[in-house]
Protein backbone atom coordinates (compact mmCIF):
# COMPACT_ATOMS: atom_id res chain seq x y z
CA UNK A 1 0.00 0.00 0.00
CA UNK A 2 1.51 3.35 -1.09
CA UNK A 3 2.15 6.23 1.31
CA UNK A 4 -0.82 8.48 1.82
CA UNK A 5 -3.30 6.01 0.35
CA UNK A 6 -6.81 6.58 1.51
CA UNK A 7 -6.07 10.13 2.67
CA UNK A 8 -8.20 12.99 1.28
CA UNK A 9 -6.55 15.24 -1.33
CA UNK A 10 -5.10 18.58 -0.22
CA UNK A 11 -7.60 21.35 -1.03
CA UNK A 12 -5.97 24.71 -1.73
CA UNK A 13 -8.81 26.59 -3.36
CA UNK A 14 -12.61 26.22 -3.08
CA UNK A 15 -14.31 23.65 -5.30
CA UNK A 16 -16.14 26.32 -7.32
CA UNK A 17 -12.84 27.93 -8.37
CA UNK A 18 -12.41 27.87 -12.15
CA UNK A 19 -8.92 28.03 -13.71
CA UNK A 20 -8.54 28.80 -17.40
CA UNK A 21 -5.15 28.21 -19.06
CA UNK A 22 -3.51 28.25 -22.48
CA UNK A 23 -4.68 30.20 -25.52
CA UNK A 24 -8.24 30.16 -24.19
CA UNK A 25 -7.12 32.81 -21.68
CA UNK A 26 -6.09 35.32 -24.33
CA UNK A 27 -9.15 34.53 -26.43
CA UNK A 28 -11.52 35.32 -23.55
CA UNK A 29 -9.68 38.52 -22.60
CA UNK A 30 -9.39 39.68 -26.19
CA UNK A 31 -13.07 38.98 -26.90
CA UNK A 32 -14.13 41.03 -23.88
CA UNK A 33 -11.84 43.90 -24.82
CA UNK A 34 -13.00 43.83 -28.44
CA UNK A 35 -16.63 44.19 -27.34
CA UNK A 36 -15.64 47.28 -25.40
CA UNK A 37 -13.74 48.91 -28.29
CA UNK A 38 -16.45 48.02 -30.83
CA UNK A 39 -18.93 49.85 -28.62
CA UNK A 40 -17.06 53.11 -29.21
CA UNK A 41 -16.15 52.60 -32.88
CA UNK A 42 -19.39 54.07 -34.34
CA UNK A 43 -18.83 57.29 -32.35
CA UNK A 44 -15.41 57.99 -33.89
CA UNK A 45 -14.65 60.88 -36.21
CA UNK A 46 -16.61 63.83 -37.60
CA UNK A 47 -19.38 61.51 -38.84
CA UNK A 48 -19.58 59.52 -35.61
CA UNK A 49 -22.96 58.69 -34.12
CA UNK A 50 -24.13 59.34 -30.56
CA UNK A 51 -24.93 56.99 -27.70
CA UNK A 52 -27.87 57.48 -25.36
CA UNK A 53 -26.92 56.55 -21.81
CA UNK A 54 -29.73 55.72 -19.43
CA UNK A 55 -28.20 55.94 -15.96
CA UNK A 56 -29.12 53.99 -12.86
CA UNK A 57 -30.59 57.13 -11.26
CA UNK A 58 -33.04 57.54 -14.13
CA UNK A 59 -31.30 60.44 -15.90
CA UNK A 60 -30.18 60.27 -19.52
CA UNK A 61 -27.24 61.63 -21.48
CA UNK A 62 -26.66 61.75 -25.24
CA UNK A 63 -22.99 61.84 -26.20
CA UNK A 64 -20.29 60.47 -28.48
CA UNK A 65 -17.49 61.43 -26.11
CA UNK A 66 -15.48 58.30 -25.35
CA UNK A 67 -14.47 59.40 -21.86
CA UNK A 68 -18.08 60.11 -20.89
CA UNK A 69 -19.31 56.76 -22.19
CA UNK A 70 -16.55 54.83 -20.42
CA UNK A 71 -17.18 56.70 -17.17
CA UNK A 72 -20.88 55.78 -17.18
CA UNK A 73 -20.50 52.07 -17.95
CA UNK A 74 -20.60 49.66 -15.03
CA UNK A 75 -18.14 46.99 -16.20
CA UNK A 76 -17.44 43.71 -14.40
CA UNK A 77 -15.08 41.77 -16.66
CA UNK A 78 -11.39 42.13 -15.64
CA UNK A 79 -10.30 42.78 -19.25
CA UNK A 80 -12.91 45.49 -19.60
CA UNK A 81 -11.68 47.02 -16.35
CA UNK A 82 -8.18 47.17 -17.83
CA UNK A 83 -9.62 49.05 -20.79
CA UNK A 84 -11.44 51.45 -18.47
CA UNK A 85 -8.21 52.10 -16.57
CA UNK A 86 -6.45 52.81 -19.86
CA UNK A 87 -9.21 55.22 -20.92
CA UNK A 88 -9.05 57.04 -17.59
CA UNK A 89 -5.29 57.45 -17.92
CA UNK A 90 -5.67 58.93 -21.40
CA UNK A 91 -8.39 61.32 -20.21
CA UNK A 92 -6.38 62.46 -17.18
CA UNK A 93 -3.15 62.92 -19.12
CA UNK A 94 -4.53 64.53 -22.28
CA UNK A 95 -8.25 65.19 -21.97
CA UNK A 96 -8.85 63.82 -25.48
CA UNK A 97 -8.10 60.76 -27.61
CA UNK A 98 -9.94 58.18 -25.48
CA UNK A 99 -11.85 56.65 -28.41
CA UNK A 100 -8.67 56.50 -30.52
CA UNK A 101 -6.86 54.68 -27.72
CA UNK A 102 -9.71 52.19 -27.32
CA UNK A 103 -9.82 51.43 -31.05
CA UNK A 104 -6.06 50.94 -31.26
CA UNK A 105 -6.01 48.62 -28.25
CA UNK A 106 -8.94 46.58 -29.55
CA UNK A 107 -7.36 46.25 -32.98
CA UNK A 108 -3.95 45.27 -31.57
CA UNK A 109 -5.64 42.58 -29.49
CA UNK A 110 -7.60 41.27 -32.46
CA UNK A 111 -4.49 41.11 -34.66
CA UNK A 112 -2.62 39.42 -31.81
CA UNK A 113 -5.40 36.88 -31.35
CA UNK A 114 -5.20 35.91 -35.02
CA UNK A 115 -1.48 35.15 -34.65
CA UNK A 116 -1.96 33.28 -31.38
CA UNK A 117 -4.42 30.95 -33.12
CA UNK A 118 -1.68 30.23 -35.69
CA UNK A 119 0.73 29.17 -32.94
CA UNK A 120 2.79 32.32 -32.39
CA UNK A 121 4.06 32.60 -28.82
CA UNK A 122 2.67 35.55 -26.77
CA UNK A 123 6.18 36.76 -25.91
CA UNK A 124 7.08 36.87 -29.59
CA UNK A 125 4.05 39.08 -30.11
CA UNK A 126 5.17 41.28 -27.24
CA UNK A 127 8.66 41.61 -28.74
CA UNK A 128 7.28 42.61 -32.14
CA UNK A 129 4.84 45.13 -30.65
CA UNK A 130 7.59 46.77 -28.58
CA UNK A 131 9.84 47.11 -31.63
CA UNK A 132 6.94 48.58 -33.59
CA UNK A 133 6.21 51.09 -30.83
CA UNK A 134 9.78 52.40 -30.98
CA UNK A 135 9.52 52.78 -34.76
CA UNK A 136 6.21 54.61 -34.28
CA UNK A 137 7.83 57.06 -31.85
CA UNK A 138 10.61 57.77 -34.34
CA UNK A 139 8.05 58.41 -37.09
CA UNK A 140 6.17 60.80 -34.79
CA UNK A 141 9.37 62.80 -34.30
CA UNK A 142 9.90 62.99 -38.07
CA UNK A 143 6.30 64.08 -38.78
CA UNK A 144 5.97 66.65 -35.99
CA UNK A 145 5.41 70.23 -37.16
CA UNK A 146 5.93 73.49 -35.28
CA UNK A 147 2.79 75.15 -33.97
CA UNK A 148 1.57 78.47 -35.36
CA UNK A 149 -1.65 80.46 -35.03
CA UNK A 150 -3.32 78.69 -37.96
CA UNK A 151 -2.42 75.21 -36.70
CA UNK A 152 -3.49 76.09 -33.14
CA UNK A 153 -6.92 77.09 -34.43
CA UNK A 154 -7.03 73.84 -36.44
CA UNK A 155 -6.19 71.82 -33.30
CA UNK A 156 -9.21 73.33 -31.54
CA UNK A 157 -11.45 72.69 -34.56
CA UNK A 158 -10.27 69.07 -34.84
CA UNK A 159 -10.99 68.39 -31.16
CA UNK A 160 -14.44 70.02 -31.43
CA UNK A 161 -15.48 68.21 -34.61
CA UNK A 162 -18.17 65.61 -33.97
CA UNK A 163 -18.91 66.90 -30.46
CA UNK A 164 -22.20 68.72 -31.16
CA UNK A 165 -20.50 72.03 -31.97
CA UNK A 166 -20.54 71.85 -35.79
CA UNK A 167 -23.22 74.55 -35.96
CA UNK A 168 -20.74 77.11 -34.62
CA UNK A 169 -17.36 75.44 -35.14
CA UNK A 170 -15.54 78.61 -36.19
CA UNK A 171 -16.99 80.55 -33.25
CA UNK A 172 -16.08 77.97 -30.60
CA UNK A 173 -12.58 77.31 -31.96
CA UNK A 174 -11.80 81.04 -31.94
CA UNK A 175 -13.22 81.33 -28.41
CA UNK A 176 -10.97 78.48 -27.24
CA UNK A 177 -7.83 80.06 -28.70
CA UNK A 178 -8.74 83.52 -27.40
CA UNK A 179 -9.46 82.13 -23.93
CA UNK A 180 -6.10 80.42 -23.64
CA UNK A 181 -4.25 83.37 -25.15
CA UNK A 182 -5.89 85.84 -22.76
CA UNK A 183 -4.57 84.00 -19.68
CA UNK A 184 -1.09 83.36 -21.12
CA UNK A 185 0.24 86.57 -19.52
CA UNK A 186 -0.63 85.41 -15.99
CA UNK A 187 -0.27 81.64 -16.44
CA UNK A 188 3.10 80.20 -17.43
CA UNK A 189 1.32 77.35 -19.20
CA UNK A 190 -2.35 78.08 -20.07
CA UNK A 191 -4.49 75.16 -18.90
CA UNK A 192 -8.10 74.18 -19.44
CA UNK A 193 -8.49 74.35 -15.64
CA UNK A 194 -8.12 78.14 -15.93
CA UNK A 195 -11.21 78.36 -18.14
CA UNK A 196 -14.61 78.24 -16.42
CA UNK A 197 -17.92 77.35 -18.10
CA UNK A 198 -21.23 79.14 -17.63
CA UNK A 199 -24.60 78.09 -19.07
CA UNK A 200 -26.74 81.13 -19.82
CA UNK A 201 -29.78 78.93 -20.69
CA UNK A 202 -30.91 81.58 -23.17
CA UNK A 203 -30.57 82.19 -26.90
CA UNK A 204 -28.70 79.68 -29.07
CA UNK A 205 -25.13 78.46 -29.43
CA UNK A 206 -24.24 81.42 -31.66
CA UNK A 207 -24.79 83.68 -28.65
CA UNK A 208 -21.85 82.05 -26.88
CA UNK A 209 -19.03 84.40 -25.97
CA UNK A 210 -15.96 84.78 -23.81
CA UNK A 211 -16.15 86.69 -20.53
CA UNK A 212 -12.81 88.10 -19.40
CA UNK A 213 -13.79 87.38 -15.84
CA UNK A 214 -16.41 85.22 -14.16
CA UNK A 215 -20.16 84.67 -14.20
CA UNK A 216 -22.31 82.98 -11.59
CA UNK A 217 -25.87 82.73 -10.29
CA UNK A 218 -26.67 84.20 -6.90
CA UNK A 219 -29.64 86.14 -5.56
CA UNK A 220 -28.89 89.85 -5.18
CA UNK A 221 -30.55 90.64 -1.87
CA UNK A 222 -31.65 94.23 -2.54
CA UNK A 223 -33.12 95.87 -5.63
CA UNK A 224 -31.51 99.17 -4.61
CA UNK A 225 -28.02 97.73 -5.10
CA UNK A 226 -26.34 99.07 -8.28
CA UNK A 227 -26.79 96.71 -11.25
CA UNK A 228 -24.30 98.25 -13.66
CA UNK A 229 -20.82 99.36 -12.66
CA UNK A 230 -17.77 100.41 -14.69
CA UNK A 231 -14.06 100.46 -13.78
CA UNK A 232 -14.72 98.49 -10.62
CA UNK A 233 -12.39 97.78 -7.70
CA UNK A 234 -13.20 94.35 -6.26
CA UNK A 235 -12.87 93.08 -2.70
CA UNK A 236 -13.04 89.30 -2.17
CA UNK A 237 -13.77 88.13 1.38
CA UNK A 238 -13.82 84.46 2.34
CA UNK A 239 -15.96 84.74 5.50
CA UNK A 240 -19.11 86.50 6.71
CA UNK A 241 -19.70 90.24 6.69
CA UNK A 242 -21.43 90.54 10.01
CA UNK A 243 -20.73 90.75 13.71
CA UNK A 244 -19.27 87.51 14.97
CA UNK A 245 -21.40 85.54 17.37
CA UNK A 246 -19.98 84.73 20.78
CA UNK A 247 -18.71 81.18 21.10
CA UNK A 248 -19.92 81.00 24.70
CA UNK A 249 -23.32 81.75 26.18
CA UNK A 250 -23.34 85.00 28.15
CA UNK A 251 -25.98 86.95 30.04
CA UNK A 252 -26.04 90.75 30.24
CA UNK A 253 -28.03 92.34 33.04
CA UNK A 254 -29.65 95.63 31.99
CA UNK A 255 -31.16 97.73 34.78
CA UNK A 256 -32.17 100.85 32.86
CA UNK A 257 -33.41 102.03 29.48
CA UNK A 258 -30.18 103.97 28.99
CA UNK A 259 -28.15 100.78 29.27
CA UNK A 260 -30.35 99.04 26.68
CA UNK A 261 -30.01 101.96 24.30
CA UNK A 262 -26.23 102.01 24.81
CA UNK A 263 -26.07 98.26 24.10
CA UNK A 264 -28.07 98.65 20.84
CA UNK A 265 -25.96 101.66 19.83
CA UNK A 266 -22.75 99.72 20.46
CA UNK A 267 -23.95 96.92 18.18
CA UNK A 268 -24.88 99.41 15.48
CA UNK A 269 -21.53 101.17 15.84
CA UNK A 270 -19.78 97.86 15.25
CA UNK A 271 -21.80 97.31 12.08
CA UNK A 272 -21.04 100.85 10.93
CA UNK A 273 -17.34 100.21 11.58
CA UNK A 274 -17.42 97.10 9.36
CA UNK A 275 -19.26 99.04 6.64
CA UNK A 276 -16.80 101.93 6.87
CA UNK A 277 -13.83 99.55 6.48
CA UNK A 278 -15.25 98.34 3.18
CA UNK A 279 -16.15 101.88 2.07
CA UNK A 280 -12.71 103.26 2.94
CA UNK A 281 -11.01 100.47 0.99
CA UNK A 282 -12.38 101.99 -2.22
CA UNK A 283 -14.13 98.81 -3.37
CA UNK A 284 -17.21 99.11 -5.59
CA UNK A 285 -17.90 95.37 -5.60
CA UNK A 286 -17.73 93.12 -2.55
CA UNK A 287 -17.82 89.35 -3.04
CA UNK A 288 -18.35 87.33 0.11
CA UNK A 289 -18.22 83.62 0.88
CA UNK A 290 -20.64 83.92 3.82
CA UNK A 291 -23.65 85.90 4.99
CA UNK A 292 -24.00 89.68 4.79
CA UNK A 293 -25.75 91.55 7.59
CA UNK A 294 -28.79 93.49 6.35
CA UNK A 295 -27.77 96.72 8.08
CA UNK A 296 -24.29 96.52 6.55
CA UNK A 297 -25.86 95.77 3.17
CA UNK A 298 -27.98 98.94 3.44
CA UNK A 299 -24.90 100.99 4.29
CA UNK A 300 -23.05 99.62 1.27
CA UNK A 301 -26.03 100.26 -1.01
CA UNK A 302 -26.19 103.88 0.19
CA UNK A 303 -22.57 104.25 -0.96
CA UNK A 304 -23.27 102.65 -4.37
CA UNK A 305 -21.39 99.45 -3.48
CA UNK A 306 -22.67 96.13 -4.83
CA UNK A 307 -22.31 93.25 -2.37
CA UNK A 308 -22.95 89.58 -3.23
CA UNK A 309 -22.81 86.92 -0.52
CA UNK A 310 -22.90 83.15 0.04
CA UNK A 311 -20.55 82.31 -2.83
CA UNK A 312 -18.99 78.86 -2.71
CA UNK A 313 -15.24 78.29 -2.48
CA UNK A 314 -14.77 77.78 -6.24
CA UNK A 315 -16.58 81.03 -7.05
CA UNK A 316 -14.46 82.90 -4.50
CA UNK A 317 -11.27 81.39 -5.97
CA UNK A 318 -12.33 82.08 -9.57
CA UNK A 319 -13.32 85.66 -8.78
CA UNK A 320 -9.96 86.33 -7.12
CA UNK A 321 -8.06 84.73 -10.03
CA UNK A 322 -9.95 86.76 -12.62
CA UNK A 323 -9.80 90.16 -10.95
CA UNK A 324 -6.37 89.80 -9.37
CA UNK A 325 -7.81 90.37 -5.90
CA UNK A 326 -6.41 88.85 -2.74
CA UNK A 327 -8.81 86.72 -0.72
CA UNK A 328 -9.16 88.46 2.66
CA UNK A 329 -10.18 86.62 5.82
CA UNK A 330 -10.74 89.57 8.13
CA UNK A 331 -12.55 92.73 7.02
CA UNK A 332 -10.53 94.87 9.42
CA UNK A 333 -7.34 93.88 7.59
CA UNK A 334 -8.52 94.86 4.11
CA UNK A 335 -6.29 97.33 2.28
CA UNK A 336 -6.30 98.98 -1.12
CA UNK A 337 -3.54 96.67 -2.36
CA UNK A 338 -5.80 93.67 -1.67
CA UNK A 339 -8.38 94.83 -4.22
CA UNK A 340 -8.74 93.51 -7.73
CA UNK A 341 -10.07 95.22 -10.84
CA UNK A 342 -12.63 94.58 -13.55
CA UNK A 343 -13.98 96.71 -16.37
CA UNK A 344 -17.68 96.11 -15.73
CA UNK A 345 -20.16 94.35 -13.44
CA UNK A 346 -23.74 93.66 -14.54
CA UNK A 347 -26.44 91.63 -12.86
CA UNK A 348 -29.80 90.59 -14.29
CA UNK A 349 -32.92 89.88 -12.26
CA UNK A 350 -34.62 86.58 -13.17
CA UNK A 351 -38.04 87.21 -11.68
CA UNK A 352 -39.97 85.75 -14.61
CA UNK A 353 -38.10 82.45 -14.65
CA UNK A 354 -38.05 79.37 -12.46
CA UNK A 355 -34.53 80.19 -11.26
CA UNK A 356 -34.27 81.93 -7.92
CA UNK A 357 -30.78 83.27 -8.66
CA UNK A 358 -29.79 86.35 -10.59
CA UNK A 359 -27.06 86.23 -13.22
CA UNK A 360 -23.97 88.26 -12.24
CA UNK A 361 -21.27 88.86 -14.86
CA UNK A 362 -17.87 90.31 -13.99
CA UNK A 363 -16.08 91.24 -17.22
CA UNK A 364 -13.22 93.31 -18.59
CA UNK A 365 -10.57 92.08 -16.14
CA UNK A 366 -7.02 93.16 -16.95
CA UNK A 367 -4.57 90.26 -17.21
CA UNK A 368 -7.04 87.71 -15.80
CA UNK A 369 -5.82 84.46 -14.32
CA UNK A 370 -9.14 82.87 -15.25
CA UNK A 371 -11.75 83.57 -17.93
CA UNK A 372 -15.22 82.16 -18.55
CA UNK A 373 -16.92 80.82 -21.66
CA UNK A 374 -20.58 81.81 -21.65
CA UNK A 375 -22.33 78.98 -23.54
CA UNK A 376 -25.64 79.96 -25.13
CA UNK A 377 -28.58 77.65 -25.79
CA UNK A 378 -31.61 76.59 -23.80
CA UNK A 379 -31.30 72.80 -24.24
CA UNK A 380 -29.81 71.18 -21.16
CA UNK A 381 -28.57 67.91 -22.72
CA UNK A 382 -27.27 69.63 -25.87
CA UNK A 383 -25.49 72.31 -23.85
CA UNK A 384 -23.81 69.70 -21.66
CA UNK A 385 -22.50 67.96 -24.77
CA UNK A 386 -21.17 71.27 -26.11
CA UNK A 387 -19.39 71.92 -22.81
CA UNK A 388 -17.78 68.47 -22.94
CA UNK A 389 -16.60 69.27 -26.47
CA UNK A 390 -15.23 72.62 -25.32
CA UNK A 391 -13.29 70.92 -22.53
CA UNK A 392 -11.74 68.54 -25.09
CA UNK A 393 -10.88 71.47 -27.34
CA UNK A 394 -9.34 73.43 -24.47
CA UNK A 395 -7.24 70.48 -23.32
CA UNK A 396 -6.06 69.80 -26.87
CA UNK A 397 -5.20 73.43 -27.61
CA UNK A 398 -3.40 73.88 -24.27
CA UNK A 399 -1.35 70.73 -24.92
CA UNK A 400 -0.44 72.02 -28.37
CA UNK A 401 0.70 75.32 -26.85
CA UNK A 402 2.78 73.39 -24.31
CA UNK A 403 4.25 70.93 -26.82
CA UNK A 404 4.78 73.57 -29.51
CA UNK A 405 4.43 70.65 -31.95
CA UNK A 406 1.47 69.07 -33.72
CA UNK A 407 0.79 66.00 -35.86
CA UNK A 408 -1.59 65.58 -38.84
CA UNK A 409 -5.06 64.19 -38.13
CA UNK A 410 -7.51 62.32 -40.33
CA UNK A 411 -5.60 59.07 -39.72
CA UNK A 412 -2.60 60.47 -41.63
CA UNK A 413 -0.07 59.98 -38.82
CA UNK A 414 -1.36 56.45 -38.10
CA UNK A 415 -1.10 55.60 -41.79
CA UNK A 416 2.50 56.85 -41.89
CA UNK A 417 3.33 54.87 -38.75
CA UNK A 418 1.83 51.75 -40.39
CA UNK A 419 3.97 52.36 -43.48
CA UNK A 420 7.16 52.87 -41.43
CA UNK A 421 6.58 49.70 -39.37
CA UNK A 422 5.76 47.69 -42.49
CA UNK A 423 9.00 48.80 -44.17
CA UNK A 424 11.06 48.03 -41.04
CA UNK A 425 9.48 44.58 -40.69
CA UNK A 426 10.98 43.53 -44.01
CA UNK A 427 14.45 43.54 -42.42
CA UNK A 428 13.30 41.57 -39.35
CA UNK A 429 14.54 37.93 -39.68
CA UNK A 430 12.52 36.29 -36.90
CA UNK A 431 8.88 35.64 -36.14
CA UNK A 432 8.60 39.09 -34.58
CA UNK A 433 8.12 40.27 -38.15
CA UNK A 434 4.61 38.80 -38.07
CA UNK A 435 3.82 40.85 -34.97
CA UNK A 436 5.20 44.00 -36.63
CA UNK A 437 3.02 43.46 -39.67
CA UNK A 438 0.05 42.96 -37.34
CA UNK A 439 0.94 46.23 -35.60
CA UNK A 440 0.95 48.10 -38.91
CA UNK A 441 -2.50 46.69 -39.80
CA UNK A 442 -3.82 47.75 -36.38
CA UNK A 443 -2.68 51.34 -37.01
CA UNK A 444 -4.88 51.42 -40.10
CA UNK A 445 -7.92 50.91 -37.87
CA UNK A 446 -8.06 54.68 -37.31
CA UNK A 447 -8.41 55.74 -40.97
CA UNK A 448 -10.57 52.65 -41.55
CA UNK A 449 -13.03 53.72 -38.84
CA UNK A 450 -13.20 57.23 -40.31
CA UNK A 451 -14.10 55.74 -43.70
CA UNK A 452 -16.70 53.32 -42.31
CA UNK A 453 -18.43 55.99 -40.23
CA UNK A 454 -18.67 58.14 -43.36
CA UNK A 455 -20.56 55.37 -45.16
CA UNK A 456 -17.75 54.42 -47.57
CA UNK A 457 -15.90 51.17 -48.23
CA UNK A 458 -13.00 50.79 -45.83
CA UNK A 459 -10.97 48.20 -47.77
CA UNK A 460 -10.72 50.20 -50.99
CA UNK A 461 -9.90 53.38 -49.10
CA UNK A 462 -7.19 51.75 -46.99
CA UNK A 463 -5.53 50.27 -50.07
CA UNK A 464 -5.67 53.67 -51.76
CA UNK A 465 -4.27 55.31 -48.64
CA UNK A 466 -1.38 52.81 -48.48
CA UNK A 467 -0.39 53.68 -52.00
CA UNK A 468 -0.69 57.42 -51.39
CA UNK A 469 1.29 57.28 -48.12
CA UNK A 470 4.39 56.09 -49.97
CA UNK A 471 4.61 59.66 -51.27
CA UNK A 472 6.36 61.49 -48.43
CA UNK A 473 5.72 65.01 -49.79
CA UNK A 474 2.28 65.52 -48.23
CA UNK A 475 0.26 64.18 -45.31
CA UNK A 476 -2.43 61.95 -46.80
CA UNK A 477 -5.41 60.84 -44.71
CA UNK A 478 -9.20 60.68 -44.60
CA UNK A 479 -11.12 63.95 -44.90
CA UNK A 480 -14.46 64.80 -43.29
CA UNK A 481 -16.31 63.15 -46.20
CA UNK A 482 -14.48 59.85 -45.81
CA UNK A 483 -12.30 60.32 -48.91
CA UNK A 484 -8.54 59.90 -49.22
CA UNK A 485 -7.04 63.38 -49.59
CA UNK A 486 -4.30 65.73 -48.45
CA UNK A 487 -4.68 66.65 -44.77
CA UNK A 488 -3.83 70.28 -44.01
CA UNK A 489 -6.62 71.43 -41.66
CA UNK A 490 -6.80 68.60 -39.10
CA UNK A 491 -4.07 68.59 -36.44
CA UNK A 492 -3.52 66.94 -33.07
CA UNK A 493 -1.12 67.80 -30.23
CA UNK A 494 1.88 65.52 -30.28
CA UNK A 495 1.29 64.41 -26.67
CA UNK A 496 -2.20 63.05 -27.42
CA UNK A 497 -0.96 60.77 -30.23
CA UNK A 498 2.11 59.63 -28.29
CA UNK A 499 0.19 58.86 -25.09
CA UNK A 500 -2.55 57.09 -27.03
CA UNK A 501 -0.07 54.78 -28.77
CA UNK A 502 1.87 54.11 -25.57
CA UNK A 503 -1.21 53.27 -23.49
CA UNK A 504 -2.83 51.10 -26.18
CA UNK A 505 0.38 49.13 -26.73
CA UNK A 506 1.18 48.66 -23.03
CA UNK A 507 -2.38 47.54 -22.22
CA UNK A 508 -2.30 45.05 -25.09
CA UNK A 509 1.04 43.68 -23.94
CA UNK A 510 -0.30 43.39 -20.39
CA UNK A 511 -3.21 41.24 -21.60
CA UNK A 512 -1.03 39.08 -23.86
CA UNK A 513 1.27 38.24 -20.94
CA UNK A 514 -1.59 36.72 -18.90
CA UNK A 515 -1.43 32.91 -19.12
CA UNK A 516 -4.05 31.94 -16.53
CA UNK A 517 -7.32 33.34 -15.25
CA UNK A 518 -8.31 32.10 -11.80
CA UNK A 519 -11.91 32.82 -10.85
CA UNK A 520 -13.06 32.09 -7.32
CA UNK A 521 -16.68 32.56 -8.46
CA UNK A 522 -16.43 29.72 -10.93
CA UNK A 523 -17.31 31.81 -14.02
Image (tube, helix red, strand yellow):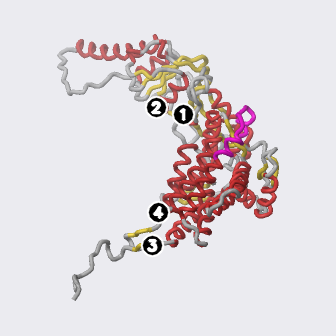
Q: Are marks 4 and 1 in contact (CB under 8 Å)?
A: no
Q: Which of marks 4 and 1 is in front?
A: 4
Question: Which residue is tagged 4?
Answer: 78
Question: Which residue is tagged 1?
Answer: 216
User: Foreground: 356 or 385?
Assistant: 385
In which quadrant of the rendered image does the N terminus lie? bottom left
CA–CA distance between discs 3 and 4? Answer: 14 Å
Residue 40, horizontal then vertical, whole percent: 62, 59
Helix, strand or loop at mark 3: strand
In which quadrant of the rendered image does the C terminus lie? bottom left
Question: Which residue is tagged 2?
Answer: 311
CA–CA distance between discs 4 and 2? Answer: 43 Å
CA–CA distance between discs 3 and 2? Answer: 57 Å
CA–CA distance between discs 2 and 1? Answer: 9 Å
Earlier sequence position, callout 2 versus callout 1: 1
Vertical placement of 114 versus 497: above or below? below
Helix, strand or loop at mark 2: loop
Earlier sequence position, callout 4 versus callout 2: 4
Asked if residue 204 can be seen in this view, the reply is no
Q: Which residue is drawn at 45% across and 73% down?
A: 20
Earlier sequence position, callout 3 versus callout 4: 3
Q: Are marks 3 and 4 in contact (CB under 8 Å)?
A: no
Q: Which mark is residue 48?
A: none
Question: Which residue is tagged 3?
Answer: 20
Q: Do the residues labelled 2 and 1 touch (CB within 8 Å)?
A: yes
Q: Nearer the viewer, mark 3 or mark 2?
A: 3
Q: How crowded is mark 1: few (under 14 residues within 10 Å), some or many (20 or more)?
A: some
Earlier sequence position, callout 3 versus callout 2: 3
Residue 69, horizontal then vertical, whole percent: 57, 55
Give the residues in magenta. Answer: 137-154
- Position of 491 with respect to 99 (left or right) is right
Amino acid sequence: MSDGAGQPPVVIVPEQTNITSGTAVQEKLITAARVFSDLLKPTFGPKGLDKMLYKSNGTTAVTNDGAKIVAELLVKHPAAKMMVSMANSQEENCGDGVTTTMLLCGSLLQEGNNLLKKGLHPLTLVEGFRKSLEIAKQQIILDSRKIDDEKLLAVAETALTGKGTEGALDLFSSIIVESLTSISETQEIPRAENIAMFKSNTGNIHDSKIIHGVAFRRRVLMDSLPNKLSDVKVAVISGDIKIRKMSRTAEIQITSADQLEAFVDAEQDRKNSISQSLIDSGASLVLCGGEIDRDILHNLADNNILAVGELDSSEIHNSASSTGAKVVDSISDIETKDLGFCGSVVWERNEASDMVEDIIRIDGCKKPGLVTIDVGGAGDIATEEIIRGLHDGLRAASLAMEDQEVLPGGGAIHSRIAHAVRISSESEPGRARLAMEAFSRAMETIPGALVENSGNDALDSILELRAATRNQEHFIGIDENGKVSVIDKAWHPRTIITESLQLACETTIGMLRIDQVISSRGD
